[in-house]
Structures are given as structure tokens and as C-alpha cells.
Image (tube, grey):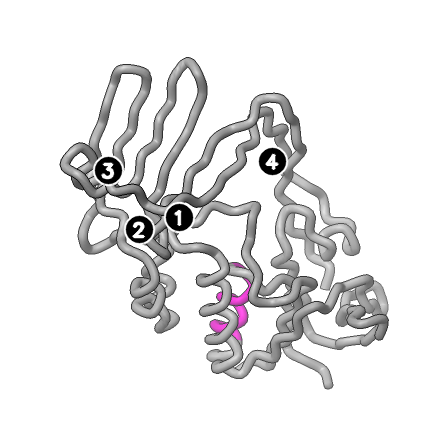
Amino acid sequence: MEYDVIIVGARCAGATLAIYLARAGLSVLLLDSAKMPRDMTLSTHFIQGAGMKVLDELGIGDELRRIAPPTKYLHSYLNDVHVKSEFNDNCLPYCIRRIHVDTVLQTEAQRSGVLLLTESTVVDVLRESGRVVGVVSKKNNETISHRSRLVVGADGPNSIIARLTNSNAYLTDTLKIPAFWTYIQTPEIWNSNKYEHTDMIVEWSDSGYRSVFQTDGNALWCLRPLKKFIIQVGIWKTQTVF
């Protein structure tokens, strides 16, 4: 079978695009190398109000809102300076674990007619007359060729599609202070008068940076930087290869 579009990467970008394309009447194959459902460690959980509006447009915003409380207030600290910000009630952000967001998106994509294949790693692209006409995936030691009119790489900053099509990276940078994060059960003090109207805390000080977000499962998402590691990141530049 030849698809109209093959999308490599079934997370928030790829699954969202797949839904829009399928609802527009296109046949869509959505591939991901991971076994789903699966969390996404290299990601924050914070969805801005504009992002929630996109999810509303897809018809899944309320389903996700039932998973986690809204973020109404942000407390920012810079040494001794404290600023309290209030988000607009009509455009509230949410901090939802990616395992929930991605699963809801993938389920909606399948409802919309998208074929989702997980644990399918793209190992090559198909070419005809210098044009990309599909991909080759591998699953359980079986290699399968999938043909399409268009191939989309939605597989992140280390995109295999970008590498296979020799796309150039742009906006490359070196992250000198990467961070680690963890969950803790929300302590009683978080809901006390001391932390009233607190959904998110971001703090900068001479000792470093830290943040705390209220997320789902009655938990706090806590982030703290590491100072001794350097990692390379980049964003791939789109090239016309079709």
C-alpha cells in the first residue's frame, strides 16, 4: 500500500500532524521506534495555553484537563526579588506527564484513521529518481518497505530522517547546564497558607536554577540543573527532498 504521508515520530508533534492530515482525508502511516505507551524523559510537561487550544481543536483538551490541575499562578524568584504572575483563566496552561499526553494523541490519531506502528525503527529511505518515496523500517528483525507521496520527520533533534536525507542542522548550540528532574508526592505544606495560590515556582539565584510544577497524580515535578556536563543540541533545517 502507498500512503499519502508517512510520519516518523509518534509523539506530540507527529501524532498531532497525523490527526490533522487524516481528518483532511489523507492516508497516514505513523511510525515510532519506541514501545508505547512510554514516558518521554527529555521533555518538560508544561503545555502553554496556546498548546491547550490546539488540543481543544483536536477534541481532546478536556480529556487531558481531567488528568491534571491547571496552572493558574507562577512564582518567580531572582535572589531576593519575588514576582507573582497570574495566567488568564481563558488560556490556562497545564503540566501533564508526557505518557498521558502522547497516549491520548496517539489514540485520537487511530480514531481518525491513522495507522500507528510502534517498535518500528526507520533504517533507510526509499528513493526514486533522487526523490524520497518512502521509508524502510525494522521490527522484530523483519524489514518492511513503506511507500508514500510524502515523508515527514517528526523524530526530534537527533532525527534519523534528517540524517538519511542529509538535512543541515541550524540553531545548533551547546547546553552547558543540562538538568535532571524527578517526581515527589505533593507535601501537605504545598497546600497550606504559606504556598497558597502556588502551582509553579521558578527560582534563579547565585547557587543555580530550580523549578517546581504541580502535575498529575497529586505529584510535583521538580527540576534541578547539573553543572558538570555538556551536551550538544541542534534543530534540523528543512530541505526540499521530495
Q: CA gap, disc 2 to disc 4?
A: 27 Å
Foreground: 69 or 12?
69
Callout 3, which amino acid? Ile
Image quarter of the N terminus: bottom right
Q: Overall secondary structure of the magenta stretch?
A: helix
Q: CA gap, disc 2 to disc 1?
A: 7 Å
Q: Which mark is residue 171?
A: 4
Proximity of marks 2 and 4: CB atoms separated by less than 8 Å: no
Q: Is residue 160 above or below residue 171?
A: below
Magenta segment range?
13-21
Which quadrant of the figure has residue 116?
A: bottom right
At label 1, counting other C-alpha atoms closer than 10 Å, the crowd grade (few under 14, some 14-19, many 20 or more) is some
Callout 4, which amino acid? Leu
Proximity of marks 4 and 1: CB atoms separated by less than 8 Å: no
Q: Secondary structure at mark 2?
A: loop
Q: Secondary structure at mark 4?
A: strand
Whichever of labels 1 and 3 marks the residue nearer the N terminus, that label is: 1
Foreground: 130 or 237?
237
Tell me, yes or no, whether the highlighted magenta stretch contains residue 36. no
Q: What residue is shown with label 3?
A: 189
Q: What residue is shown with label 1?
A: 46
Proximity of marks 3 and 2: CB atoms separated by less than 8 Å: no
Q: Can you give x and y, in whole percent of width and height, for residue 41 in the image?
A: 56, 48
Q: Secondary structure at mark 1?
A: strand
At label 2, counting other C-alpha atoms closer than 10 Å, the crowd grade (few under 14, some 14-19, many 20 or more) is many
Q: CA gap, disc 4 to disc 3?
A: 42 Å
Q: Secondary structure at mark 3?
A: helix
Q: Nearer the viewer, mark 3 or mark 2?
A: 3
Whichever of labels 2 and 4 marks the residue nearer the N terminus, that label is: 2
Q: What residue is shown with label 2?
A: 93
